[in-house]
Image (cartoon, grey):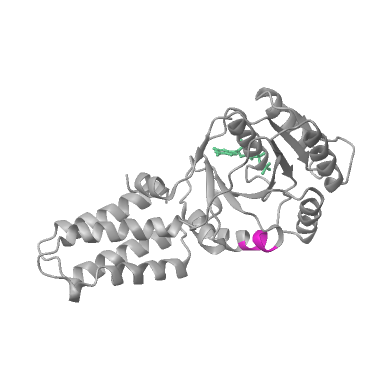
Amino acid sequence: MVLQDLGRRINAAVSDLTRSQNLDEKAFDGMVKEICNALLEADVNVKLVSTLRKSIKATVNFKDLPPAVNKKRLIQKAVFDELVKLVDPHAEPFKPKKGKPNVIMFVGLQGSGKTTTCTKLARHYQTRGFKSCLVCADTFRAGAFDQLKQNATKAKIPYFGSLTSTDPALVAAEGVAKFKKEHFEIIVVDTSGRHRQEKDLFDEMTQIQRAIAPDQTIMVLDATIGQQAEAQSKAFKETADFGSIIITKTDGHASGGGAISAVAATHTPIVFVGTGEHMLDLERFQPQPFVSKMLG
Ligand code: GDP
């Protein structure tokens, strides 16, 4: 189910109820149930859905509502607010500072869109007046450095990497040191993802993190990941303790529920979403507009 379909279903449930003649508790319960089913089918974590159900029912407490109250408005607002709460981590996203190096390290599984997103982010800050650059610390995947080089060249962003080294922490440290000396303000470090959450990958992430002491670690999460999102983001959080999330491929046929669950599981803000393969396809994430857009 794509995100817009989820929104459409939630909208339909709310308007069916608010249009109905007898807006009673039974009909209201039916609407809450339909919303929860839609969220579950969109891969939102079961526990989260259960919390949402309780919160909506507590906010719209039918028994204690004064007769004159506008039930329709109250219900619409409760549903909207609870959906916003689901994607709002209540944590401030990282803001880079001008005039000093801001080291940003990327983590995530292979294929999630890390390398593409590294360039998108470096470019994003570059166009906002930050002197930006890219470091490739993926010495595992053949072609990783080439891919980063190509992207960086297209975006006219200086880059650093090694075709021969097998020590990612060393390459990362060298790149960061070089660019710090050259007074770069945004230093984005791409790391290896491999296929699964293997121990080697996590060891490597820890070593790189120790070597470069990033100001911010960002986890890249593929929107199509579905129910595995919660476990995956928790595993990464325990090892790399990322401070923000970027969800990629939100332009595809993803439900978005996985993304919602990842935020809730890690209490970590989504800062941007990837909306396509092109360099410019990166948008700031904000809970309220995200939910508004979802609801259409
Ligand atoms: P990495 O292995 O994590 O570094 O992933 P890549 O950056 O190589 O991306 C894997 C694939 O996903 C590539 O084909 C990218 O073009 C594609 N990709 C990345 N971000 C997005 C996005 O936001 N939307 C779409 N449609 N494709 C994306």
Q: Residue at x 48, y 39 (%)?
A: 251
Split into quadrants, the picture shows ligand 1 in the one at top right
Q: Is residue 293 left or right of residue 102?
A: left
Q: Pick whichever, 86 or 251, lies toward us.
A: 86
Place residue 163 in its image quadrant: top right
Would residue 72 be counted in the magenta stretch?
Answer: no
Residue lying furthest front: 99
Q: 102 or 72, which lies in front?
A: 102
Q: Magenta residues, as a range? A: 234-238
Task: Residue 30: tell me if it is visible.
Answer: yes
Q: How many marks?
A: 0
Relative placement, left or right, of 174 versus 59 is right
The x, y position of residue 96, in whole percent, is 62, 41
Question: Does residue 235 belong to the magenta stretch?
Answer: yes
Can residue 143 be seen by looking at this rendering? no
By secondary structure, the bulk of the magenta-drawn segment is best described as: helix
Q: Tell me which residue sits at (70%, 57%) in the image.
A: 240
Q: Nearer the viewer, residue 201 or 292?
A: 292
What residue is rendered at 85% in x and 35% in y?
Answer: 162
Q: Position of residue 263 (x, y in %)?
A: 52, 57
Which quadrant of the rendered structure holds the C terminus? top left
Quadrant of the rendered structure where residue 95 is?
top right
Q: Nearer the viewer, residue 7 or 104?
A: 104
Q: Position of residue 76 (x, y in %)?
A: 25, 57
Find residue 85 and report its horizontal and vertical position in percent: 41, 59
